[in-house]
Amino acid sequence: MNLNFSEKIFSFFHQLIEKKYHLKKLSQVIKNNANFKRPTVFDVGGNEGESIDFFLNLFINPKIYSFEPEAKSYKKLRKKYKNNKKVNLYNFAFGSEKKKMDLKINVKSSTSTFSKINKHSKYYNLKSLILTHGKGSIFTGIENVQVDKLDNFSNKNKINNIDILKIDTEGFELNVIKGAKKTLKKTKLLIIEFQLNDMYLNYSSKKIDNFLKFNNFIFIDSLKFPFMQYEDRIYINKNIKND
């Protein structure tokens, strides 16, 4: 069994569970807490369009801004959504400041990351064993990509409000929201991935939660992904009426 085949098997079952179970629960949480008809959606960490498809199916006429820094995944997005006027695609990342950064490319593209890896992590070593059969690193290379602040993008593009902000950046979430202090004030609902493992060095879910609470977000639910050590947490902005 080669490396590519292992990744395909892993991705197949991951996407199946995500579609049949995880996203169904997420859609119900969103419906229970907000009544969006034509939402503006920011998809930070677009990968190959899983979240884009989710929002397109959930809403009749959403306006989606999707951001994906990895070249290969972005190319797939461009091909898939080139004729869809509801989807706006961007090939860069968000962080706490504007600069170039090295993105570590993972065998499983959805887990490429800027974060530093804890190579002593049992979870990291288990993932490596599953994806590479112990024959090497799950990271295949590095891409030097542009990182900007979400606040800069919102200001430049005159984004007055965001109904849903989804952030999935493999341990880099705190950096993203630190660069989005002004944007968070006009964001109604936030979906953000939290790690439940020690794969990323200096990662702190408590710091993320405290930052969001300080910026007027209320935690409403968490959805753990089956068999995996991460979850989506959903917050709402207590200063904005979600109707």
Image: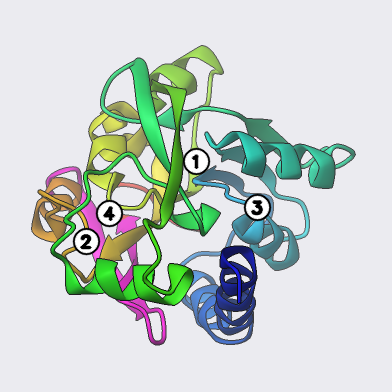
Q: CA distance from mark 4 to mark 1?
A: 14 Å
- Residue 217 is left or right of residue 162, and the answer is left
Q: CA distance from mark 3 to mark 1?
A: 22 Å
Amino acid of disc 3: Glu
Determine the residue positioned at 65% across, 40% down.
72
The secondary element bearing badge 3 is classed as: loop
Asked whether the beta carbons under mark 4 and mark 1 sit within 8 Å of each other, the answer is no
Mark seen at residue 162: 1
Amino acid of disc 4: Lys
Q: Point out the stretch of residues depicted in magenta.
A: 214-236
Please tell me whether mark 2 or mark 4 is closer to you in this view: 2
The secondary element bearing badge 2 is classed as: loop
Camera-nearest residue between 240 and 147: 147
Nearer-N-terminus badge (3/2): 3
Q: Position of residue 182 (x, y in %)?
A: 30, 27
Q: Is the magenta region chiefly helix, strand or loop? A: strand
Please tell me whether mark 3 or mark 2 is closer to you in this view: 2
| Residue designated by label 2 | 199
| Residue designated by label 3 | 48
| Residue designated by label 4 | 238
Residue 215 included in the magenta stretch of the image:
yes
Nearer-N-terminus badge (3/1): 3
Nearer-N-terminus badge (2/4): 2
How crowded is the residue under tag 2: few (<14 C-alpha within 10 Å), some, or many (20+)?
Answer: many
Furthest toward the front, the residue is 135
Amino acid of disc 1: Ile
Amino acid of disc 2: Met
